[in-house]
Image: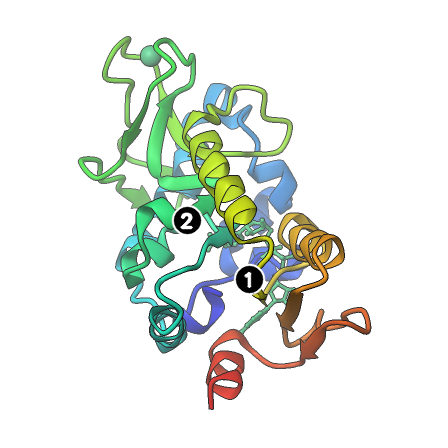
Amino acid sequence: MGVDSGLPDFRGNEGFWKAYPPIKKLGLDFADMANPKWFSINLSLAWAFYGHRLNLYRDTTPHDGFRILLDLVKTKNDNYFIFTSNVDGQFQKAGFAQDKIYEVHGSIHHLQCTKNCKNKIWEAKDEYIEVDMEKFEAINIPLCENCGAIARPNILMFGDFSWNHKRATKQESKYNKWIKQNKNKKIAIIEIGAGKDIPTIRNEGNLLSKKYTNTKLIRINPRDFEVDKNGIGLAIGGLDGLREILK
Ligand SMILES: NC(=O)c1ccc[n+]([C@@H]2O[C@H](COP(=O)([O-])OP(=O)(O)OC[C@H]3O[C@@H](n4cnc5c(N)ncnc54)[C@H](O)[C@@H]3O)[C@@H](O)[C@H]2O)c1
Ligand SMILES: [Zn+2]
């Protein structure tokens, strides 16, 4: 969904390295880089990666597809739920209601203590991480307000046993409640840019459309658009796909 706002996806090593040439030099792939171990073994690298992304997502304006989707849900009495693996906060920025969003992999706009001292999650809004892009090093590092240990983004990483999922779990129960309330209605699932490498979003759409016969899955994806016979696959980008289906 973010690609048409100019945000990189991390499709394969090439896509990831194109977005982060300094990480190519280090020979790391996305799964190597998105690992909590860097917060203990190379802190300035860890926060260079996440600080740069935080700044990028803050500076990004959501593309018109978000507005098209908002206009659509308004015609449905605002009866919708956003289920996203994006951590970039673009749905909130575009005007979707915070209590109708489930960020299944967390949010970069929230921080937690690496030691989880008080099981707390706080907003990153008061932090600005300056990154030296030549050296790919963070100049400043956010700390836990309580114990002074290093803070990290409240995002699920690979091999991550210290992710604080409290916030995501609250969102999940709202999402499950919404599904329960609406399972006898006709539900349109509009899946946008859900990849296969980490198929969390794809699996959810597939599962819902199989479980409830009154749902329809519309899969918008320029490459990974194949869908089973009950769904509709559109081989097109997110913004154009939304424009097309609402024409
Ligand atoms: N903005 C973010 O928050 C952000 C950015 C990068 C990655 N991530 C997360 O990291 C994980 C892996 O990332 P990844 O990028 O390898 O995901 P991925 O493997 O899911 O690949 C990206 C998908 O987007 C599709 N795509 C590309 N351009 C598109 C467009 N214009 N419109 C619609 N779809 C398009 C590709 O065909 C592919 O299926 C995912 O969980 C992802 O959510 C988040
Ligand atoms: Zn702490």
Where 173 falls versus 29 (above or below)?
A: above
Residue placed under numbered mark 1 in the picture? 18
Q: How far apart are the alpha carbons under marks 1 and 2?
A: 30 Å
Where 32 falls versus 228 (above or below)?
A: above
**Pointers 1 and 2 in contact (C-beta within 8 Å):** no
Where 49 falls versus 15 (above or below)?
A: above
Residue at the right extreme, as displayed: 229
Q: Which quadrant of the view contains residue 229?
A: bottom right
Callout 2 amino acid? Ile
| Residue nearest the observer in this picture, 8 or 121 | 121
Badge 2: residue crowd in 10 Å (few <14, some 14–19, many ≥20): many
Residue 131 appears in view: yes
Report the label total: 2
Residue placed under numbered mark 2 in the picture? 101
Q: Position of residue 96 (x, y in %)?
A: 32, 58
Q: Position of residue 32 (x, y in %)?
A: 63, 37
Callout 1 amino acid? Lys
162 horizontally vs 229: left or right? left
| Residue nearest the observer in this picture, 191 or 207 | 207
Is label 1 in a helix, a strand or a loop? Answer: helix
